[in-house]
Image: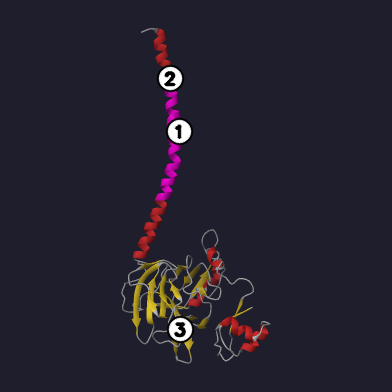
Amino acid sequence: MTNQFVNKIVATLMLAGSILPVMGQDMIARQAPVDIKMRAVDSVEIQRLFHQENLENPAGDLYPNWENKFVNAYGNVKLPDEYKIDLRNFCMPINNRIVTSNFGYRRRFRRQHQGLDINANRGDTIRAAFDGKVRMSTFQRGGYGNMIVIRHPNGLETVYGHMSRLLVKELQNVKAGDPIGLAGDTGRSYGVHLHFETRFLGEYIDPAKLFDFANQDVTGDFYLFRGRGRGTLLGKHDASGKAENSDIAQAGEEVTYPSVANSKSRSNRAQGGTHFHTVRRGETLSSIAHKHKTTVTKLCRDNGISTKTTLKVGQILKYS
């Protein structure tokens, strides 16, 4: 073997030694975006599986049981001192903006009204307010009529009553916005409307504290449930995730913060010159028309009512 040939071999080996690391680096560089993509895919899949598990047993860490005989099946269950309920990724249960009966004591019937009644036309679509699982889908004679109870991963249960038709079955998973029934007047009802309740471990929460039907929106990003009958609306958060004005929130008062998270819901707000008025005690169509510089005829036309319609305290009227 000549020295010249040996030198060629050595040179070739040295060149190969310098090329291989470069090739390895190139392969790693090419592989890096693939790894990033795979990690992203894995993250999305993990989130999907986690969400699916939450739908199979929504809020399973909170609720002591799952049954379909009673709307409130939890008796004297121990309530957490506080619990943050996520109101984002919601859907309004009905498109109508007019609340015909508020939450609270009904003097006329001498009993509590544990939800809101929202005006509806027969056959209007009723939709799931959040992702969840149907716990009850049944007919209750003399009460809710055709009714549905959905338990949601955020800890809430929502109740929908007086429907003319049920579109979902018990144990069925639903997404926010899925049709679940059609509006009607079954059960103990005095006209077509949706009876809508929001509950947490059986404890009633006034739906008006969570849902703004006039603006077809939620009232905040979160609702902080604090013991029986108390809660705080949370919307704006600092970098640590704590609510602003937390000193007021700690007092258990009802504090409203503007919602910032769900931008798509803002598109549902009233557009143009349409406004809303909440009827107060003693007001008439004439006084409301005078206050907003419109006419009784326009008020009646905008709200589908007549001059003989009896206004109810808390009723919401459109005007332009």
Q: Which amino acid does label 3 sit on?
A: Val
Of the numbered discs 1 and 3, the one sitting upstream in the chain is 1
Residues 163 and 65: in front is: 163
Q: Provide residue 266's location: percent of width, then percent of height.
A: 56, 67
Number of residues whose C-alpha sits closer than 10 Å to that of mark 3, classed few (under 14), some (14–19) or many (20 or more): many
Which dot marks residue 156? none
Viewer can see residue 182: yes
- Between the C-alphas of marks 2 and 3, the distance is 88 Å
Tell me whether circle 2 and circle 3 mark residues in contact (CB < 8 Å).
no
Residues 315 and 251: in front is: 315
Q: Name the residue under label 1.
A: 26
Q: Give the range drawn in magenta.
A: 12-41
Q: What residue type is labelled 2?
A: Met
The C terminus lies in which quarter of the figure?
bottom right
Q: What element carries label 1?
A: helix
The N terminus lies in which quarter of the figure?
top left
